Image: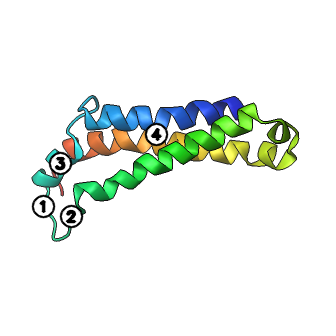
């Protein structure tokens, strides 16, 4: 299960980069321009995700490489939830673009 944590942790920044490059549909700027709101976060505000993804990958790598993590039963218990959270984070990015580009109700 811990290998899934690592794979999904690596998938998050890759999917994010693909999303911003337009692989899954329009990027955030295009969607924001299409559906104007009263409050839009500045582009640099999203840079925090780089740090979040880095820490997620570091966590996943640490639990694969360290000696203590291999024998820690807590990590075994939380690995399914961690892998699920990482997978859902990777999944929402392309889904957001698909829904926003297909929905005319906004």
Q: Which mark, residue 40?
A: 2
Q: Say which element carries label 4.
A: helix
- Which percent across, then down, holds residue 80? 70, 42
State the separation of the CA atoms marked 1 and 2.
8 Å
Q: Are marks 1 and 4 in contact (CB under 8 Å)?
A: no
Density class for disc 4 (Cα within 10 Å; few <14, some 14-19, many ≥20) is many
Is 95 left, or right, of 76 in this rendering? left
Q: Say which element carries label 2.
A: loop
Q: Which residue is mark 1?
A: 36
State the separation of the CA atoms marked 1 and 3.
10 Å
Q: Nearer the viewer, residue 24 or 50?
A: 50
- Which percent across, then down, holds residue 65? 74, 32
Q: Which residue is mark 3?
A: 29
Q: Say which element carries label 3.
A: helix
Question: Residue at 17% across / 48% down in the picture?
Answer: 29
Question: Residue at 28% across / 42% down in the picture?
Answer: 97
Is 1 left, or right, of 15 in this rendering? right
- Which percent across, then down, holds residue 44? 27, 55
Q: Which residue is mark 4?
A: 90
State the separation of the CA atoms marked 1 and 4.
25 Å
State the separation of the CA atoms marked 3 and 2.
10 Å
- Which percent across, then down, holds residue 26? 20, 38
Who comes first in sequence, dot 1 or dot 4? 1
* Residue 61 location, quadrant: top right
Question: Residue at 47% across / 38% down in the picture?
Answer: 12
Density class for disc 2 (Cα within 10 Å; few <14, some 14-19, many ≥20) is few
């Amino acid at each position: 299960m811990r290998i899934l944590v690592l794979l999904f942790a690596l998938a998050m920044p890759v999917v994010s980069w693909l999303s911003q490059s337009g692989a899954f549909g329009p990027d955030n700027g295009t969607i924001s321009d299409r559906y104007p709101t009263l409050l839009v976060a500045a582009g640099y505000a999203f840079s925090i995700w780089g740090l979040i993804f880095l820490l997620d990958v570091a966590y996943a790598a640490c639990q694969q490489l360290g000696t203590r993590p291999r024998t820690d039963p807590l990590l075994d218990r939380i690995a399914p939830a961690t892998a699920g959270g990482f997978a859902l984070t990777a999944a929402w990015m392309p889904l957001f673009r698909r829904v926003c580009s297909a929905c005319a109700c906004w």
